[in-house]
Image (cartoon, rainbow, N blue to C red):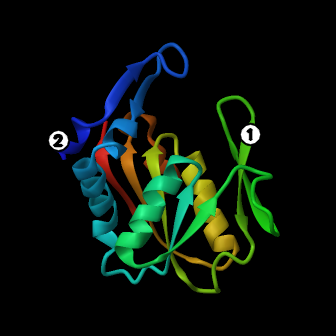
Amino acid sequence: MDNLKARIRHIPDFPKPGILFYDITTLLNDPRGFHDAVQALAAPYRDKDVEQVVGIESRGFILGAAVATALGSGFIPIRKPGKLPSKCFREEYALEYGTDGLEIHADAVRQGQRVLVVDDVLATGGTARAAARLVRQIGGELVGLSFLIELDFLKGREKLAGEDVYSVLQY
């Protein structure tokens, strides 16, 4: 996977001092890199009968939609509050200071449908855990969570204990 890591730009002190930002736009811009990333995200779930792929706003939309196509599945966006037009379920999660939330359409999955959550980065795990809860709240069967990048030092995987968690790249 070094070929994928080589296509990701590192931006120090963004969005604030002391943060090293992993910019995947350079990977998405490269046809071979984008293809390889999508295939790697989908690979562990090819034989798991995934019926829907959930992408978390916003880079998860890009990767999730592509993974859904690769798996022959439907795509469901999970968005920040107030962005979806129909009846929604909401899950709040803790941030360093305060809270944030995610929403999913109440009718996004049928009872028991097999769902894969896809996002670009697994950091502290709060967003991913909220997405997993939303999938279950609306009746989905969570197959797993697939991430392009995992920031191991933030221990987000611990918040997802008991889940099938896969990451293509680790930092």
Question: Which is more foreground, mark 1 or mark 2?
Answer: 2
Report x, y in % for residue 65.
47, 63
Check contact, mark 1 vs mark 2: CB within 8 A: no
The residue that appears at 69% across and 75% down in the rendered structure is: 138
In which quadrant of the rendered view does residue 35 lie? bottom left
Residue 2's disc number: 2
Q: Label 1, label 2: how many angstroms apart (C-alpha)?
A: 35 Å
**In the image, 124: left or right of 8?**
right
Judge by depth and name the residue closer to the eye, 41 or 160: 41
Q: Quadrant of the C terminus?
A: top left
- Label 2 sits on a secondary structure element that is helix
Work out whether 3 lies above or below 68.
above
Task: Give the number of the disc on residue 99.
Answer: 1
Where is 13 relative to 163, above or below?
A: above
Disc ID at residue 26: none
Q: What secondary structure is found at the residue carrying circle 1?
A: strand
Viewer-side residue, 61 vs 51: 61
Question: Which residue is at the front of the view, 121 or 29?
Answer: 29
Residue at image x 67%, y 54%? 79
Tell me the amino acid under the disc marked 2.
Answer: Asp
